[in-house]
Image: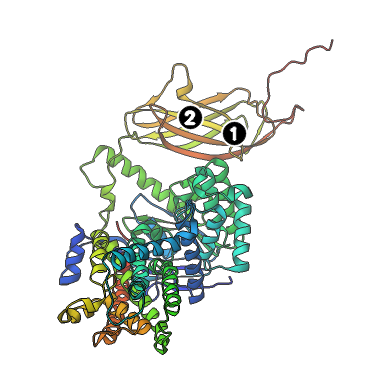
């Protein structure tokens, strides 16, 4: 179940006009330009390992995933992997809108070459996971809502109990319940020893899921190794790149290499702000793992801006199941008080008497543009801490102000 | 781990499977093709019979009754009907497979990029989908022949070989055209027009004997004409121009191997459009 990339290189022949391919084929003279999408990829994903791929858009991550999944072949080198492979490159590819949910599941089973008993097992697993009713599954897929469609597609894609799971950005779709469920399914497969190769822009997810990661840049592996180091290096690069894009648009980013892909990344017009860290502080110190109910707590969000534009900082207290307990933002102040200016900013918020009762809590932090609509950066489910309600006996999530009236 | 596969991309196709798995997929895909083809229609599956029968009826009324075309060398009441049916038994499945198959790769372009599977399945499904019309056509032909007292001749033992030749020839051409259409979308439009022309260059609605003898040799350059002539010879004992059998063998080899070779040599373009 090891995935081994041996000197993988992928070049695309680019024809500027369709007839060029015809002339080339007839006259045997080259009429194309070569685009190197990946080169010198040489590494191994160990059996049972969860391996993350990070990098900019167009860096070659998806190409690498497709090569691993076998939908495209490397120009040079080889990929070897063993066992059953489930590739979640796009959910629901191959579903027929006229066919019922059941028939589409069976079709996915047939794509894996399953029949008879194995097919029935597959259908049973996918059906159970999809949480769709019998009635629904007997209807044509074209009548499904997009959420139902995604549930079915994910269920059908992972029902083969893969030894190797290849996941593209596919998971950032569907409702929260579905996202959580599909993430859990991936974790479950991982527990069972499946090798997971996955690519994401959500660096928090990569940090928390992957043992090792590779940063692909311009078709080459820029860094590979333990996740933390690779992700940190990538983040540093991102910061540099943003600064460059913003202020030296004419100048090439420092370490762009062979591929012309990064040039395609146009300077973004949205302000560039990155979340640096979130610090909590109580009388017990910095970032306490445990907080008492009604303790005085100050939270500090540190962000770094690379542009003079205005932006908003928001944060929320959430429970591990992502239920929002309380959220606020500089935009919600009356009047809204956006942050602006280049450099490091710290938003400090004090809860003089934190009204949380016993439980696990985490933080979500968001940086939004001036309109409050576009998310510039986010960090979700970070800095977990426990609240203990030791002095009072009330139960629940939060303390609500109340008064027991005298009985009549 | 019941189906372990070892993949080394330099030697094998994008998603190699054993033959049984391919067979399962092809069969299942066929079922789906049939189910969805007539989904939402009232007559449903009956359309598979209505279409060829209607075509047969139109040509029979037009050419057999109105224009009263006669088939020399086939002296039975409905000689023209048998001749027409022998031609349509070849032509209808052929045009059905090509018509569906030519756009098959282009239609599943996105799918091929996302799902590892052997692309040959798609043209194979188109050809498989035409087998129903083929069975209906040949079945009807044989039944009518017996009913009209034509044969059955000993030469019918060659019929399975001819059907096989037809399937290989059709598959080869479908592979070729589907890939060509994927690379150059002009092909689809050309094929739509070309098939009409091709139909009238094939002795289906008219018997070859109505064509001046000096042109007979030209028909050997038409693979479908070779096939039609051979079927007419085997089932109806009609005379064929010399060399038709040999030409058919040549065409089966050229189109079968050529289509396969072209498909394989261009396959790397699938799923790779930037």
Give me the residue at 49% from left, 52% from top.
B42
Give me the residue at 36% from left, 45% from top.
A238
The spot of residue B81 in percent (x, y) is 35, 72
Residue B219 or residue A263, whichever sits in front = B219
Asked whether the residues under the numbered discs 1 and 2 touch, taking CB atoms below 8 Å apart as contact, a structural biologist would say: no
The residue beneath circle 2 is: A314
The chosen color scheme is rainbow
Q: Residues within 10 Å of mark 2 (few under 14, many from 20)?
A: some
Locate residue B109 relative to residue B136 in the image: left or right: left
In terms of secondary structure, where does tag 1 sit? strand
Residue A289 or residue A29, whichever sits in front = A29
The residue beneath circle 1 is: A285
Mark pair 1, 2: CA separation: 23 Å
Total numbered labels placed on residues in the image: 2
The spot of residue B13 in percent (x, y) is 39, 72
Dot 2: chain letter: A
Can you see residue A20? yes
Q: Residue furthest front?
A: B77
In terms of secondary structure, where does tag 2 sit? strand
Q: Residue furthest top?
A: A408
Can you see residue A12? no
Locate residue A349 relative to residue B234 in the image: left or right: right
Of the two numbered discs 1 and 2 on the same chain, state the one appearing first in sequence.
1
Locate residue B254 relative to residue A374 in the image: left or right: left
The spot of residue A182 in percent (x, y) is 56, 50
Q: Residues within 10 Å of mark 1 (few under 14, many from 20)?
A: few
Residue B247 or residue A259, whichever sits in front = B247
Q: Are marks 1 and 2 on the same chain?
A: yes
Q: Residue furthest bottom?
A: B154
The image quadrant of residue B154 is bottom left
């Amino acid at each position: 179940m090891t995935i081994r990339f041996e000197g993988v290189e992928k070049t695309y022949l680019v024809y500027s006009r369709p007839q060029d391919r015809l002339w080339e084929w007839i006259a045997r003279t080259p009429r194309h330009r070569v685009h190197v999408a990946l080169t010198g990829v040489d590494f191994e994903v160990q059996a049972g390992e969860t391996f993350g791929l990070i990098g900019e858009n167009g860096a070659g991550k998806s190409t690498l995933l497709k090569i691993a999944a076998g939908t495209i072949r490397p120009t040079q080198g080889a990929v070897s992997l063993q066992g059953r492979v489930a590739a979640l490159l796009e959910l629901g590819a191959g579903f027929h809108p006229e066919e019922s949910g059941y028939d589409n599941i069976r079709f996915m089973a047939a794509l894996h070459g399953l029949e008879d008993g194995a097919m029935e097992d597959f259908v049973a697993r996918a059906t159970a996971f999809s949480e769709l009713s019998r009635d629904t599954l007997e209807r044509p897929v074209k009548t499904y809502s997009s959420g139902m469609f995604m549930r079915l597609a994910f269920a059908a894609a992972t029902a083969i109990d893969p030894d190797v799971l290849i996941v593209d950005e596919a998971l950032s779709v569907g409702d929260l319940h579905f996202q959580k469920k599909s993430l859990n399914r991936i974790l479950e497969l991982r527990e069972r020893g499946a090798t997971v190769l996955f690519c994401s822009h959500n660096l928090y997810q990569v940090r928390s899921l992957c043992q090792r990661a590779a940063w692909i840049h311009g078709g080459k592996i820029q860094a590979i190794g333990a996740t933390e180091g690779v992700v940190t290096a990538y983040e540093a690069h991102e910061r540099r790149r943003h600064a460059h894009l913003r202020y030296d648009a004419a100048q090439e980013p420092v370490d762009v290499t062979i591929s012309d892909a990064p040039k395609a990344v146009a300077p973004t017009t949205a302000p560039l702000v990155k979340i640096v860290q979130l610090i909590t502080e109580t009388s017990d110190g910095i970032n306490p793992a445990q907080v008492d109910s009604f303790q005085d707590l100050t939270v500090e969000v540190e962000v770094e801006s690379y542009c003079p534009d205005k932006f908003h900082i928001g944060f929320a207290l959430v429970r591990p199941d992502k239920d929002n307990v309380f959220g606020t933002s500089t935009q919600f102040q009356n009047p809204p008080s956006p942050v602006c200016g280049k450099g490091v900013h710290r938003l400090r918020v004090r809860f003089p008497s934190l009204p949380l009762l016993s439980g696990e809590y985490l933080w979500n932090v968001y940086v939004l543009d001036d309109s409050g609509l576009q998310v510039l950066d986010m960090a979700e489910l970070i800095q977990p801490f426990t609240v203990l309600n030791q002095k009072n006996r009330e139960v629940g999530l939060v303390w609500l102000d109340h008064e027991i009236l005298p009985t009549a | 781990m019941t189906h372990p596969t070892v993949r080394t991309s330099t030697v094998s196709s994008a998603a190699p499977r054993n033959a049984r798995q391919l067979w399962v997929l092809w069969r299942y895909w066929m079922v789906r093709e049939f189910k969805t083809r007539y989904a939402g229609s009232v007559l449903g599956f009956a359309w598979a019979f209505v279409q060829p029968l209607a075509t047969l009826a139109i040509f029979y009324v037009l050419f057999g009754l109105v224009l009263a075309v006669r088939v020399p060398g086939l002296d039975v009441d409905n000689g023209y009907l048998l001749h027409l049916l022998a031609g349509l038994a070849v032509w209808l499945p052929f045009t059905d497979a090509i018509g569906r198959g030519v756009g098959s790769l282009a239609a599943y372009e996105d799918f091929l990029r996302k799902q590892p599977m052997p692309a040959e399945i798609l043209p194979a499904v188109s050809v498989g989908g035409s087998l129903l019309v083929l069975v209906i056509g040949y079945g009807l032909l044989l039944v009518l022949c017996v009913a009209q007292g034509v044969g059955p001749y000993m030469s019918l033992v060659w019929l399975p070989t001819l059907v096989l030749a037809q399937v290989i020839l059709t598959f080869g051409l479908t592979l070729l055209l589907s890939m060509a259409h994927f690379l150059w979308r002009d092909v689809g439009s050309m094929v739509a027009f070309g098939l009409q022309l091709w139909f009238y260059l094939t002795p289906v609605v008219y018997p070859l004997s109505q064509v001046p003898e000096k042109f007979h040799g030209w028909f050997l350059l038409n693979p479908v004409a070779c096939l039609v002539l051979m079927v007419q010879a085997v089932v109806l004992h009609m005379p064929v121009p010399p060399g038709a059998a040999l030409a058919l063998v040549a065409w089966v080899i050229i189109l079968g191997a050529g289509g396969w070779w072209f498909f394989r040599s261009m396959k790397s373009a699938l799923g790779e459009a930037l």
